[in-house]
Image: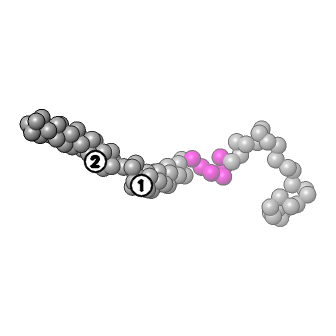
């Protein structure tokens, strides 16, 4: 028996979808491939989030710096208002 090459052999029955979709699990065994698959997804997630959080304005450091800048601006305005009141 010859193995059909890319389903080009006309004697091979065409697959009937979706009734025969279960056959993919005869090729891909989840007990073997699920852990490496999730490991690859975890690495991709890590790379994407590292890049996204390194963009200006999106990281944790930038949000903390913005909060510090807002507080320092409020303190500077308060001090300047007190200095103006003392001069008058």
Quadrant, the N terminus: bottom right
Q: Is residue 82 left or right of residue 61?
A: left
Residue name at image x 39 percent, y 54 percent: 56
Residue name at image x 87 percent, y 54 percent: 12
Q: Is residue 19 above or below residue 45?
A: above
Q: Nearer the viewer, residue 31 or 82?
A: 82
Quadrant, the C terminus: top left
Q: Nearer the viewer, residue 61 or 40?
A: 61
Any part of residue 50 in sight = no
Please state the horizontal and vertical placement of residue 9, each as a whole percent of the image: 88, 60
Please state the horizontal and vertical placement of residue 34, each as a whole percent of the image: 53, 48
Q: Secondary structure at mark 1?
A: loop
Instruction: Give the number of marks.
Output: 2
Q: Which residue is mark 1?
A: 55
Asked if residue 27 is among those painted magenta in the image, a careful observer would answer yes
Q: Nearer the viewer, residue 70 or 3?
A: 70
Asked if residue 12 is among those painted magenta in the image, a careful observer would answer no
Q: Disc number at residue 65? A: 2
Tell me, yes or no, whether the two marked residues, 1 and 2, touch with CB atoms within 8 Å: no
Segment colored magenta: 25-30
Please state the horizontal and vertical placement of residue 18, each as a whole percent of the image: 77, 39
Q: Is residue 55 left or right of residue 18?
A: left
- Mark 1 or 2: in front is 2
Quarter of the image where one finds residue 7: bottom right
Any part of residue 80 in sight = yes
Residue name at image x 39 percent, y 49 percent: 57
Q: Earlier in the sequence, mark 1 or mark 2?
A: 1
């Amino acid at each position: 028996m010859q193995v059909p090459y890319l389903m080009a052999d006309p004697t091979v029955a065409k697959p009937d979808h979706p009734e025969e979709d279960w056959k993919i699990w005869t090729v891909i065994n989840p007990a073997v491939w699920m852990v490496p698959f999730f490991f690859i997804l975890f690495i991709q997630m890590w790379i994407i989030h590292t890049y996204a959080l390194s963009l200006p304005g999106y990281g944790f450091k930038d949000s903390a710096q913005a909060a510090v800048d807002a507080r320092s601006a409020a303190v500077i305005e308060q001090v300047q208002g007190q200095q103006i009141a003392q001069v008058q």
